[in-house]
Image (cartoon, rainbow, N blue to C red):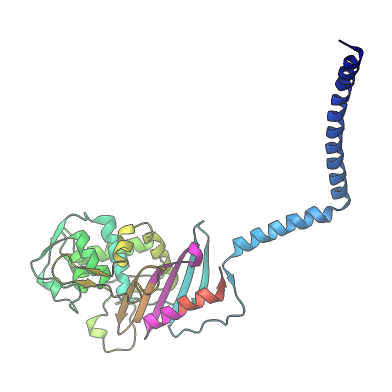
Amino acid sequence: MNKNLKLFLTAFVIVVPLFWGLNALEGELRNFFFWHEMAKNPQITAAQANQLAFEERIRNLKPIRNKRVEDLEIGAKSAMSFYISRQGEERILFEKYGDWRLPIASLTKLMTANVVLEHYDLSKEIRISKEAVNQEENLGKLEVGELLSVEYLLYPLLMESSNDAAFSLANDYDGMAQEDFVGLMNREAQRLNLQNTHFVNPSGLDPEEEEDSEKINYSTINYSNTIDLITLVKELLNKPLIWGILSTPKLNLYGPELINSNKLLGEFSSIIGGKTGYTEKALGCFILLSEAPKSKGYLVNVILGTGDRFGEMEKLLGWLRTAYIW
């Protein structure tokens, strides 16, 4: 090996580690001066941290009330809109006399369906009695002597609000009498802690002897309030068959076609399902379950005591979209 090559290799062995060391030192110095500057100016990192925390708080607070939108004026005696987030957060977004105890007409049938699902064999067949068919109104289109499954009877009960179906489920099922069935309804109300709810029949019909009287006798009528009804809907969220029925616009399995009484079904893509009700005592009633804007959870909307249940519900839904920042 000649002299020049020896000198080159010696220099290489010395310079390369030195070069690496200098690069490493440069990196350490950059880190040192960066954190030294941060230590002298903690407001920089604090501002960044505060900004992230603020953004997280805003996300957790949504929906946020948009104060530029005026409060909603609604004609119903009582109303409430209740938000349930996908994380389980619950908030009241709108309330008008939510604790008022009022007649609930055919909203009753949600509890009727709940009791059936808890205590009945859905595949068991029921023979429709003459007394069932003689109930007020001809909704459900049942015929005397017809043999229908318990599961099928839930469709006219919830879609068309059939009093015939309600009577048949409470009276024509083996071993069941209406007073026993109503007892189960009230027992279920107690289990759910519905402190302002009571049932006297499975349909929600007003007592015949009091139809001409404006005064409400709460000992002879089905009653509840919006707070209790929302608790009931929350319980029913675990029963997909009910919402499958309430989301069905039309059904034709046995003869005449069943048509859902919920006129808003299909009008809004966010609607999951709803139950209507009306009597002279209760006036118009409506429960509607819908998806919250931006798929952030559910909205349970309840309206009691109105002459325009569909119009008032549309008004409420429209207000919720603009009155809150989602």
Inspect the magenta stretch and tell me whether residue 289 lies in it: yes
Q: Is residue 22 visible?
A: yes
Quadrant in the picture for the C terminus? bottom right
The number of numbered badges drawn on the structure is 0
In the foreground, 232 or 43: 43
Residue extending farthest to the left is: 145
Q: Residue at x 26, y 60 (%)?
A: 116
Q: Is residue 97 visible?
A: no
Looking at the rendering, the stretch of residues picked out in magenta corresponds to 288-315
Quadrant for residue 272, please give it. Answer: bottom left
Looking at the image, is 207 positioned above or below residue 325?
Answer: below
Looking at the image, is 290 positioned above or below residue 102?
Answer: above
Quadrant for residue 53, please give it. Answer: bottom right
Inspect the magenta stretch and tell me whether residue 154 lies in it: no
Image coordinates for residue 273, horizontal then vertical, percent: 35, 68
Quadrant in the picture for the N terminus? top right
Image coordinates for residue 312, horizontal then vertical, percent: 42, 82
Looking at the image, is 23 positioned above or below residue 153?
Answer: above
Q: Residue at x 15, y 64 (%)?
A: 172
- Is 24 placed left or right of 193 in the picture? right
Q: Residue at x 11, y 68 (%)?
A: 129
Image coordinates for residue 58, horizontal then vertical, percent: 64, 63
Residue extending farthest to the top is: 1
Image coordinates for residue 19, horizontal then vertical, percent: 86, 29
Quadrant for residue 248, please give it. Answer: bottom left
In the foreground, 12 or 25: 12
